[in-house]
């Protein structure tokens, strides 16, 4: 997973991964570019800089789905954020440190899926706060439009928070729900083109939620 701010398409597009991966995680967690002088990301020490790397938080990575429709993730990593820019709307809820892990599937041609788990140290993280985080970022995005929210129910996840939006030439959906003390989030991006199908997009959303629920039921 390569987290990035909803409003920062430019930063996402500068990353070296394929476009579909960048788009799929466009609405994911911010990793601030503001790094204190001499600071490096250390997942075991005090949070002084945002960052992520594979294996940073193996306990969270273990809660992710191992496959989507029989395909293993393109990338799996985890990280932590504590900067005001990274926490966004969560700062208003007095969240000071947020940890996460994500698995991303680059499905090609501008299509991507990311499954993420979010947690706060020694406490519960309401899924409603993560839904608020994504909505605030989407509505602030300069290239984001047609933002819609709903509360659909999915088998195994129960009632969720869903956000749908257009970002440039990408149709994106974010589904958020509670899993005990953590919040689970699924992000799906598919390209907007003359042959695009909203039904196919929704089927991919349902498949991503289903894979994540399967990991949840397996004790992930």
Image (spheres, helix red, strand yellow):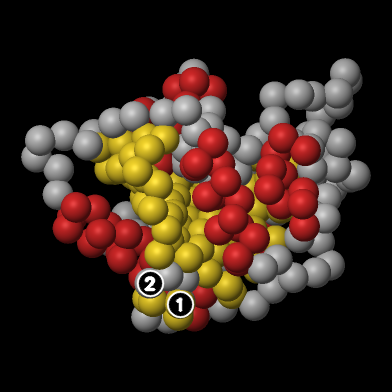
Alpha carbons under labels 1 and 2: distance apart = 6 Å
The structure residue drawn at horizontal position 9% and vertical position 40%, both measured from the top left corner, is 195
Asked if residue 163 is positioned above or below residue 80 in the image, the reply reads: below
Q: Which residue lies furthest to the left in this view?
A: 195
Pointer 2 local density, CA inside 10 Å: few below 14, some 14–19, many at least 20: few
The tag earlier along the polypeptide, 1 or 2, is: 2
**Going by the image, does 158 lie left or right of 47?**
left
Residue sitting at x 10%, y 35%: 194
Residue denoted by label 2: 152
Q: Identify the secondary structure beneath mark 2.
A: loop
Residue 47 percent coordinates (x, y): 85, 42
Judged left or right of residue 184, residue 55 is right
The quarter in which the C terminus is drawn is: bottom right
Q: Quadrant of residue 60?
A: bottom right
Q: Is mark 1 on a helix, strand or loop?
A: strand
Q: Is residue 208 visible?
A: yes
Q: Measuring 34% from the left and 29% from the top, which residue is drawn there?
A: 168
Disc 1 target residue: 159
- Residue 151 in the image, given as x and y percentages of width and height: 42, 70
Report if the CB atoms under discs 1 and 2 are less than 8 Å apart.
yes
Few, some or many residues within 10 Å of mark 1 (<14, 14–19, 20+): some
Give the answer, above or below, for where 15 lies relative to 60.
above
Residue 101 visible here: no
């Amino acid at each position: 997973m390569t987290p990035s701010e909803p409003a920062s398409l430019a930063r996402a597009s500068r990353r070296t991964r394929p476009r579909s991966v960048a788009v799929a995680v466009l609405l994911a967690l911010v990793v601030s570019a503001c790094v204190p002088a001499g600071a490096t990301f250390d997942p075991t020490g005090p949070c002084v800089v945002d960052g992520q790397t594979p294996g940073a938080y193996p306990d969270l990575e273990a809660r992710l789905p191992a496959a989507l429709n029989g395909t293993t993730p393109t990338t799996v990593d985890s990280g932590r954020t504590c900067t005001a820019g990274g926490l966004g709307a969560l700062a208003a809820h007095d969240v000071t440190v947020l940890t996460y892990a994500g698995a991303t599937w680059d499905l090609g041609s501008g299509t991507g899926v990311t499954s993420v788990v979010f947690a706060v140290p020694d406490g519960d993280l309401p899924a409603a706060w993560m839904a608020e985080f994504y909505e605030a970022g989407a509505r602030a995005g300069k290239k984001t439009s047609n933002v819609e929210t709903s509360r659909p129910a999915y088998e195994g996840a129960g009632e969720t928070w869903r956000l749908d939006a257009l970002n440039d030439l990408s149709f994106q959906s974010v589904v958020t729900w509670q899993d005990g003390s953590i919040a689970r989030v699924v992000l799906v991006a598919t390209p907007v083109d003359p042959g695009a199908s909203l039904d196919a997009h929704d089927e991919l959303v349902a498949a991503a939620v289903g894979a994540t629920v399967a990991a949840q039921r397996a004790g992930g």
